[in-house]
Amino acid sequence: MRRSPGLSVRLKLTLSYAGFLVVAGALLLAVVWVSVLRYVPDTPKGLLGISPNRYLLEHTFASAAAVAMVFLLGFGLLGGWFLAGRMLAPLTQITEAARTAGSGSLSHRIRMKGRQDEFRELSDTFDTMLEQLESHVAEQQRFAANASHELRTPLAISQTLLDVARKAPTRDQGELIERLQTVNTRAIGLTEALLLLSRSDRGDFPRERVDLSLLAEEAAETLLPLAEQRGITLDVTGGAARTSGSADLLLRMVTNLVQNAIVHNVPAGGTVTVHTEARGDAGVLRVENTGRRLPPELVPTLTEPFQRGTERVRTDEHVGVGLGLAIVHSIVRAHAGTLDLAPRPAGGLLVTVRLPDPRS
């Protein structure tokens, strides 16, 4: 981008340095001039004795002062140009890094050396921002690629079923329609999950007072038939746990956690415990389920979009889209909370959500 017409910052600083030096020199010469002339006799021009007189001093001092002022001006310009360049060199590095980042390359880092001054602090802050941007862009690109893959699968299956129906009109249409409905339901569920994830990431939702214990009871009541179908005991314990946020998003968060705990509670006949409590200035939700043992290295990846994990088992009637815990993580982050996942030694998973209560 071309710079608009006008003086550069370096030239402005140079002129400022030189002007200050010239003004300071002029003031100094003026003080000397006034101080010296006070003690020099005012002798007529034609009577030049051996002693100094004001006429002689004015002529000799004026020429010397003019030379000194010219020297100060030149010295100020040269020295100011050099000093301004030295002072603005770190800013030039930051500008080049910003220009590089603007062209699409976020891997560049300034890594400015030297003492910890304002420019060094700005450089370190800019490097941190670039690192976060690069990580966020990489995450978004990975998410877009995974979403495209997940959406392409049901569309491809639908296209295959339609081709079969067109080429074999005598085939049982009821079976094809049922399969199409299943695939279409999965695509709709994935689209709604993506929209919810985008909404929670933006954080543009109204906030109100919410009690996590009431949401836990509502989610448990909704998912109780599923738990009974699998022979799983579902318990809700604890007391009030208040926070501030979107009741709809927080209900979806609790529902996702409880549903995951039920669906992944293998073998059947286990337990799921939902506990809420107020701890300090935050509301705490804890969802714990029995099940298979999870490798510790797998647990941190479960909140990534479309990450199902090799040990996460799903059944046909509850085929997920790999966004359950990703949505939970996004909702918790949008509410300035923390999400902790820990594998249970005996098998299963313990999920702890801590959401701040601004009014505590």
Image (spheres, rainbow, N blue to C red):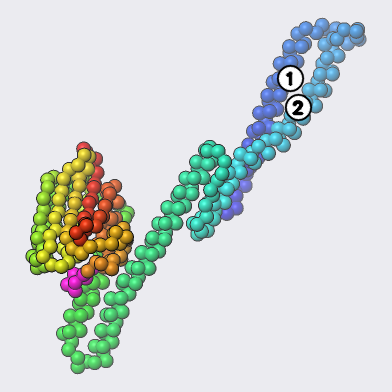
The spot of residue 289 in percent (x, y) is: 17, 59
Looking at the picture, tell me which residue is in the foreground, 128 or 181. Answer: 128
The residue lying at 57 percent from left, 41 percent from top is 114
Does 241 appear above or below 234?
A: above
Per the rendered image, the range of residues in magenta is 314-320
- Give the residue type that dot 2 points to: Met
Does 121 appear above or below 305?
A: above
Q: Which residue corresponds to mark 2?
A: 69
Mark 1: which secondary structure? helix
The spot of residue 245 in percent (x, y) is: 23, 48
The spot of residue 38 in percent (x, y) is: 75, 8
Mark number, residue 29 = 1
Classify residue 64 as left or right of residue 343.
right
| Quadrant of the frame with the N terminus | bottom right
Total numbered labels: 2
| In contact (CB < 8 Å): disc 1 and disc 2 | yes
Looking at the picture, tell me which residue is in the foreground, 140 or 339. Answer: 339
Q: CA distance from mark 1 to mark 2?
A: 9 Å
| Quadrant of the frame with the C terminus | top left
Does 285 appear above or below 306?
A: above
